Amino acid sequence: MSPEQSAGAGKICFHCGEPVTSPGIRSAEKYFCCNGCKQVFLLLNESNLYSYYDLNPAPGKTAREPGNKSRFAYLEDPTVIDRLTLRSEGDLTTAIFKIPSIHCSSCVYVLEKLYKLEPGIKSSGVDFLRKEVSLKYAASETSLRKVVELLASIGYEPQIDTADAKNTIRSDSRRDLYIKIGIAGFAFGNIMLLSLPDYLAIRNPVDPPLQTLFRVLSLLLALPVLLVSARGYFKSALTGLRQGLINIDFPVSLGILSLFGRSVYEIFTGAGAGYMDSFVALVFLLLLGKLFQEKSYATLSFERDFRSYFPVSVIKKTPEGEVNIPLSKLKIGDRILIRNGEIIPADSILIRSDTRIDYSFVTGESNPVKKTAGELLYAGGRQVGGAIEVDVVKPVSQSYLTRLWNKDLYRKHQKSHLLSLTDRVSRNFTAGVVLIALAAGFYWLWQDFPRAVNAFTAVLIVACPCALALSAPFTLGTAMRVMGKNQFYLKNVNVIEALERIDTIIFDKTGTLTYSGKSAVRFIPAAGQKELTPPEQKRVRSLVRHSSHPLSQSLYGWLSGADLLEVRDYREVPGQGIEGFIEGHHVKVGSAEFTGAAQKVTAGSSVWIAQDDKCRGYFRFSNEYREGLGTTLERLSKNYTIALLSGDNDRERESLLRYFTAEDLHFDQSPFDKLKFISEKQRSGARVLMIGDGLNDAGSLKQSDVGVSISEDKNAFSPACDGILAAGEFAELPDFLLLSKDAGRIIRMSFLISFLYNSIGIGFAVTGNLSPLISAVLMPVSSVSVVAFSTLVTRFSGRRRGLLI
């Protein structure tokens, strides 16, 4: 062995941390396990990305087997590129990849600096929890294949579903979990059978050779459970330790290893039968709990089936006229109407007129993009201007719109106090358990060695905080499922915790407290004016068709006629009105100030009409408030401060005083006024829930602690909201809030039960009188009992609130 090789013996790779098995590879006094890791180091160093190694020691993934780059040749096929990329705008193309090897802050650092490695990549961002990287690249400077090759070369090869080459990212986690559960379940069943002779040996002793055979077979069956089924817990614990953290998987891993190690010791020394049945039962139950948690999140997540659960509709053009259909029924080839401010739900072709599309929700760019007839419009864009007709060319983009809803720009970054409490408690709990176990072992070591071993292992096993790990996700997952079944859809579990802490609720009026499209309408001419002529009515109807405001849609439905006129230079001023040119006439629809009205209206909601700078009068709407509104607001007012922010004038003040106090009624509020009011409330310490229209109140929904959009027969999707409530379930709002409070109490009760169990268990274990067998039985029993308690009590709470039958 050369001196250079000898110097490298026993080293670990500077890039990935693996042992240096080929010690001759080094650069800049740093050792590498392979040439692949060395090349990645040189590439990062040359690109001034050395900070990658400063954030975490040996943060990379080994590049020992980079593979043949020709395997990415299929990524040059235009059809494949079209299916694997989300959207293209000019020369920029957007793609999102699943990268399982993302595991630390160094990974995030280098993946967000890809533009330094490849100039054709213009930007990139990482979703750490989803292990996804979203990037934009210039097609004229690089290609999809080169991007993927770059990611693979630095140890971050993406998972791409090449079986059908569509824009779905293969997720093997669920399949792997099923395999782990299958292995653990198979071993559990067979080891239980092999353990029966030991359980029955008190009356009928088993022949020693046969007994030894059964125990060895149990050990062999348990090995795959340790090496495969329980591997995730060990990996998570080690990752936490490398980061200087003790997560909740650390004590779980200690308990698993203690139980397995004690069992191996007893089997090989002949001291006993071991506890392999309890060991595999423990792992099996932990994995079942993990599966339940994942299924809960999948059921409650829009990723499961966006089209089925998203409670919005689109307007479809049919030979019989325009009809509202749910997104789940939208098919390729359908022609749909997209009004001003509405989101395009699927990739579509623009028909006839030109328009502008705002992709700020998708790209962050604030300037709308001009589109002409025949061009492709991508899902997620928001229509700016008059209504347009488009032909759907791709199915509803479920995962894409879900990412849009969960985009960082629209997250409030709510901290999960209950979930973070779990990790905080587990860290302190683990340190305490290890200290108690060591103290008990040392205490008995000088008096009774078997008892010392017994006490040490029993404490670690019985005190495993599995119940702490499961109580919060099971409770919150069950609560979200109950709400979802009642058509109240939340963005994530953090919203439930935020709802629990709410003390102020602010309502919009039109379309929130009132029914949309159920108003009685009457036209009142202005002083010296006459009724609208049929041509004028047709112009008004053609104009309001382009707006998604509830009053505009009520007016559109009330005005008769099938023929519509072309609207040019359509413009909508939030909180004021809409205008456009029709047949050479300048038509305005909106507030009195917007249309230049000289008089004021004292009763009913009103929409003023002006033509060619002459105010013609107004349409009076007799609002119909939602059924049970009084009861709903009365229930809420007992526990919350409630207020109303309305863009209308105060003509309905007297009616609303039945539900609100005078100081909590605010009229003539512009979108900016609403935003300012909520901000002032928050500065005074209030935690605000805003309930309004998904489009017109987007700013207020985003500013509030929790923003809920009411959906009723319109495409009111807004990434700014935290939840979407079907209009028909408005009366259940107090029960949803009560359920969120119940969920918090149930989690705290689960923590109390877990601590009580652990205190009693540890109290017996330190005496050395609690056998590991009993400890191993109690350990999964505690988890099952807490899970059962959390789930059943949450469901009971939902039933008590009238949300479950």
Image: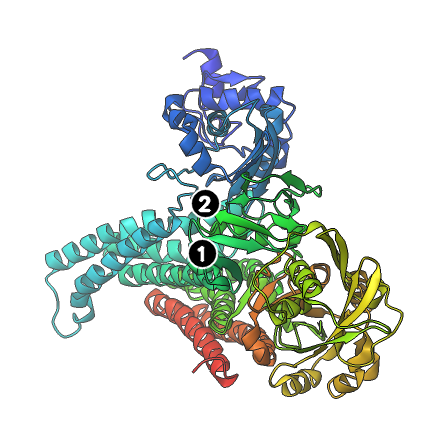
> Within the image, what quadrant is residue 696 found in?
bottom right
Q: Position of residue 527 (x, y in %)?
A: 86, 74
Residue 581 drawn at (x, y percent): 73, 52
Please name the residue shown 86% across and 73% down the image.
528
Whether residue 563 sits left or right of residue 587 in the image: it is: left
- In this rendering, the answer to whether 162 lies above or below 217 is above
* Residue 96 visible in the current orientation: yes
Q: What kind of residue is marked 2?
A: Val
Q: Position of residue 50 (x, y in %)?
A: 63, 26
Sequence-earlier tag: 2 or 1: 1
Mark seen at residue 653: none
Which image quadrant for residue 687? bottom right
The residue tagged with tag 1: helix, strand or loop? loop
Q: Tell me the SS state at disc 2.
A: loop
Task: Read off the residue under disc 1.
Answer: 330
- How packed is label 2: few (under 14 Cα within 10 Å), some, or many (20 or more)? some
Return the residue nearer the eye: 218 or 334.
334
Disc 1 residue type (three-letter): Leu
Taking the image as drawn, is residue 237 in sight? no
User: Separation of disc 2 and disc 1 at Cα?
Assistant: 11 Å
Q: Position of residue 239 (x, y in %)?
A: 50, 45
Disc 2 designates what residue? 393
The residue at 61%/36% (across/down) is 109
- Could you say which is closer to the camera, residue 54 or residue 36? 36
Q: Are marks 2 and 1 in contact (CB under 8 Å)?
A: no
